[in-house]
């Protein structure tokens, strides 16, 4: 279980100190599929980074399975079972998709095993396994490889920071299916930062963060009707259906 | 065949665990200590200076030549001339490499001059690895000079790797290409400590539709210095590409000097150069996969130099 207690995060910029996360409290139970939404600039991605240890909080505590991880670094949190998919995945010259999958799983995955994860995110494995994770991959391909590394890692808590960002709608349709499957099969908890209605729709719980606070938190059936039609629940796919199934370019 | 140090050096530079298949010439501490020839590949000792001539008959295909050099004594300095005469319509692999183990006080130096004469329509793959070890005060110095003469429609693919332990290296590579010839160079270099490495390329694209693709990837750590120079001249309708991509760390210094000369309106020449430190996001990503910061750095470097 993830427990966030009185978490605050301030940054210093030209205009002086600014509070991004303000005294935030949140609990994520084991096995839950939780989607965090809310307006841009509300502190969602910062929250995700604080959970992974990429950012350090100004005050407050984060507990994971009863352990205070507030002062633990990224590596230690990863080894405790937290994994993270970046909003903008990073590229590596010379590191192949297979190498990255092996690093993620922490063992020498066979090609066949790695292919299962790639197939899961809709990539034809034989075309990708030997490709370098470099600029030759498109934004959508890179995003799927990123998600495949999180699947291969198989931790207790997977955090996805805006998986829909930077990909075309066609890829998004397939991505939704990945999360739908994950919702059904995953053993651990899943935390997704997303505005997309279709992702919100498969959540067990929805959390709305605005201006550094939690403004709503509850079961999907309770929260979703309240936020439909706002910026917190965007329907990306209506436009796609207007194109009668034609692929949309990124 | 060799003592333990020499055997290890041979393994590092040529992946050799014993006597290689195909033609070979093993040079140990200034002497030829092993040689084998085949029906198509002859190796003869030069009479006017140190070195060998490797003669490959026209039409030789799928054969390999190993010519490793090991220096396991302190204080050896040698300049060796190796000439490769590759006939027409060949397809061969040449594996060279030099390993120096210097635990003594005096410098050990191997300057290898390799000249390749590649016949029409032939294909050559050349792999060269340099490796140094030993904790003596004596330096490990290698100054390889490579010259490549490519006849019409021939192709040379050169893989040159120096990853560890060579204190000082000045590497010069010259190539002249005739019509339809193609040269591919993949250089990998890692310097550490107070090492100094210079790599300098001069390529003359003389024949119509000749082409060169030269890619250097390097990592400079500690207080080492690296200089990369490439001069590509396009003297006719041709294409040339060179790329120098370097990771800088610690207090290292890297100089990249790209040079392109077009002497013809249809010479298409490109140079790319980039020097930068390891991106912080790359390290963070690998840490989220459970690697420590140091392990992440090692993975990034070894991938980059692969």
Image (cartoon, rainbow, N blue to C red):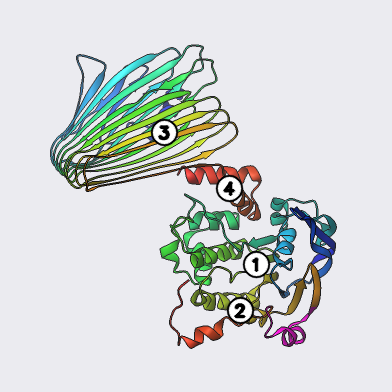
Q: Are the residues tagged 1 and 3 within 8 Å (C-beta)? A: no
For marks 4 and 1, give the CA distance.
21 Å
- Frontmost of labels 4 and 1 is 4
* Residue drawn at point x = 44 percent, y = 35 percent: B256
- Frontmost of labels 2 and 1 is 1
Residue B222: x %, y % from top left: 58, 30
Q: Which residue is label 2 attached to?
A: A180
- Frontmost of labels 4 and 2 is 4
Q: Are the residues tagged 4 and 1 within 8 Å (C-beta)? A: no
For marks 2 and 3, give the CA distance.
51 Å
Residue A226: x %, y % from top left: 75, 86
* Residue A220 counted in the magenta span: yes
- Frontmost of labels 2 and 3 is 3
Q: Chain of mark 4?
A: B
Q: Are marks 3 and 4 on the same chain?
A: yes
Q: Which mark is residue A160?
A: 1
Q: Chain of mark 3?
A: B
* Residue drawn at point x = 50 percent, y = 15 percent: B138
* Residue drawn at point x = 29 percent, y = 24 percent: B113
Secondary structure found at label 1: strand
Q: Chain of mark 2?
A: A
Q: Which residue is label 3 attached to?
A: B228
For marks 3 and 4, give the CA distance.
22 Å
Residue nearest the observer in this picture, A182 or B268 = B268
Q: Which residue is label 4 attached to?
A: B279
Taking the view exactly as shown, the residue that stands out farthest to the front is A15
On screen, residue A54 above or below A167: above
Q: Which residues are magenta?
A: A217-231
Q: Chain of mark 1?
A: A
């Amino acid at each position: 279980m993830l427990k966030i207690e009185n978490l605050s995060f301030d940054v210093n910029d030209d205009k002086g100190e600014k509070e991004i996360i303000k005294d935030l409290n949140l609990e994520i139970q084991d096995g839950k599929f939780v989607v965090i939404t809310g307006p841009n600039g509300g502190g969602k991605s910062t929250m995700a980074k604080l959970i992974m240890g990429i950012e350090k909080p100004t005050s407050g505590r984060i507990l994971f399975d009863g352990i205070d991880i507030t002062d633990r670094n990224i590596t230690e949190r990863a080894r405790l079972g937290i994994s993270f998919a970046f909003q903008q995945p990073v590229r590596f010259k010379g590191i192949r998709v297979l190498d990255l999958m092996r690093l993620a799983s922490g063992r020498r995955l066979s090609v066949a095993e790695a292919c299962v994860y790639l197939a899961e995110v809709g990539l034809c494995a034989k075309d990708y396994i030997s490709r370098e994770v470099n600029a030759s991959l498109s934004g959508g391909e890179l995003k799927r490889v990123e998600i495949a590394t999180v699947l291969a890692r198989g931790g207790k808590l997977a955090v996805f920071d805006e998986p829909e960002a930077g990909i075309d709608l066609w890829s998004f349709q397939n991505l939704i299916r990945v999360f739908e499957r994950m919702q059904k099969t995953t053993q651990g908890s899943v935390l997704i930062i997303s505005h997309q209605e279709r992702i919100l729709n498969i959540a067990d719980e929805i959390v709305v963060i605005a201006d550094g606070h939690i403004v709503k938190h509850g079961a999907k059936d309770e929260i979703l009707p309240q936020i439909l039609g706002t910026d917190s629940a965007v329907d990306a796919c209506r436009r796609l259906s207007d194109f009668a199934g034609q692929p949309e370019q990124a | 065949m060799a003592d333990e140090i020499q055997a290890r050096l041979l393994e590092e530079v040529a992946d050799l665990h014993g006597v290689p298949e195909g033609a070979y010439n093993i040079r140990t501490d200034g002497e030829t200590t092993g040689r084998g020839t085949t029906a198509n590949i002859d190796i003869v000792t030069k009479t006017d200076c140190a070195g060998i001539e490797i003669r490959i008959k026209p039409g030789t295909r799928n054969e390999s030549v190993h010519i490793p050099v090991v220096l396991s004594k302190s204080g050896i300095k040698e300049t060796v001339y190796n000439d490769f005469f590759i006939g027409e319509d060949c397809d061969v692999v040449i594996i060279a490499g030099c390993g120096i183990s210097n635990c003594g006080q005096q410098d050990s130096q191997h300057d290898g001059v390799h000249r390749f004469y590649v016949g029409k329509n032939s294909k050559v793959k050349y792999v060269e690895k340099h490796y140094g070890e030993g904790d003596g005060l004596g330096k490990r110095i290698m100054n390889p000079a490579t010259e490549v003469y490519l006849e019409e429609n021939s192709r040379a693919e050169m893989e040159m790797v120096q990853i560890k332990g060579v204190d000082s290296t000045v590497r010069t590579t010259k190539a002249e290409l005739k019509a339809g010839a193609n040269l591919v160079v993949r250089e990998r270099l890692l310097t550490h400590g107070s090492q100094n490495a210079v790599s300098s390329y001069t390529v003359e694209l003389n024949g119509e539709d000749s082409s060169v693709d030269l890619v250097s990837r390097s990592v400079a750590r500690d207080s080492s210095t690296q200089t990369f120079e490439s001069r590509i001249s396009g003297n006719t309708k041709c294409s040339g590409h060179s790329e120098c991509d370097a990771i800088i760390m610690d207090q290292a210094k890297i100089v990249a000097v790209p040079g392109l000369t077009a002497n013809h309106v249809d010479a298409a020449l490109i140079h790319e150069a980039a020097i930068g430190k390891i991106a912080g996001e790359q390290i963070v990503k690998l840490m989220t996969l459970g690697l420590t910061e140091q392990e992440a750095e090692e993975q990034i470097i070894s991938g980059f130099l692969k």
